[in-house]
Image: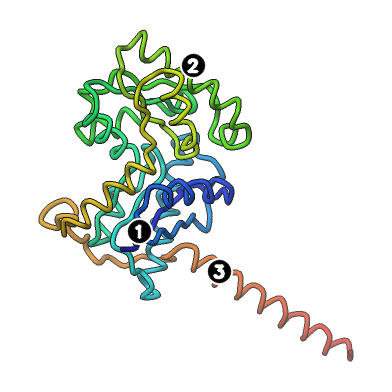
Amino acid sequence: MRILVLNPNTSAAMTAEIAAAARAAARPDVEIVCRSPYFGAEAIDSAAESYLSAVGVMDVVARLMRAGAFDFDAVVLAGFGEHGRDALAEMLSVPVFDIAECAAHVAHLIGRRFSVITTLARSIPPIQDRLLLAGLNAHCASVRACGLGTAEVDADPASAVQAIVEEAARAISEDGADVICLGCAGMAGVTAAISAKLGVPAVDGVAAAVALAQAVVGLGLSTSKAGVYAPGPDNPRSHWPLSQAIDSSRERSSEAIDSSRERSSEAMGL
């Protein structure tokens, strides 16, 4: 089994962390391939960056498909509540797993009410929207923010652990949560600290998504193509995949510059 894990931001460090978390959750016979977009934001902390990341992960998949190199049994979108999951499910015949949905599904199996601890307060509404769309909001006690941006969580893990644990404690005591979901792929290493200090299960979305991907593929199941995830109309698309169009444009510009220099040299008799 091969699982493609897509980090929707362009941070090489976070891509490596996500890959490590995915491989830790994978069976020995499962190959994890982790990729990030060719363009986009290094951290996703706004609606604009989230929509851009969706185009970025779609572009990665489109390039693989065009090259005949898409050879995966499942895809994990490792952005907690980021856009793009529905588009990927439409593009692909293999199942696509969003880490926010997967974390919530697993949390619901082991507790009655869960809370999500995310990065910034502005990330709360998109996560609430994703849970509502997936039908998982009824068992969500709260979505709380630790006050650190995605890049800050990645740059200072020690401070991030303290802030996340403190917010998780408030979710348990004030909101009645009995399971904590980590609302950022970069928080994967915090699960043990939460369980040790607060005495409740903590769910990492990347690990949950990999585990569910293995289970669903093992059952021989995939995305239904009878309804909304049926292939879309084959309308003409200009400059797609976008990253290839950008590369081609750069090559043409470079060739034009070289040609212009040659003509100038010839005109000067050099």
- Where residue 240 sits: x, y (%)? 41, 65
Position of residue 265 in the picture relative to residue 211 (left or right): right
Mark found first going from the N terminus, 1 or 3 = 1
Say which quadrant the C terminus sits in. Answer: bottom right
Mark 3 lies on residue: 247
Q: In which quarter of the image is residue 172?
A: top left
Give SS at disc 3.
Answer: helix
Q: What residue is at 32 percent from the left and 12 percent from the top?
A: 175
Q: Which amino acid does label 3 sit on?
A: Asp
Q: Which mark is residue 3?
A: 1
**Closer to the camera, 165 or 248?**
165
Q: Which mark is residue 107?
A: none
Q: What residue is at 40 percent from the left and 68 percent from the top?
A: 64
Q: Which amino acid does label 1 sit on?
A: Ile
Q: Distance between the residues labelled 3 and 2?
A: 46 Å
**Closer to the camera, 66 or 212?**
212
Mark found first going from the N terminus, 3 or 2 = 2
Give SS at disc 1.
Answer: strand
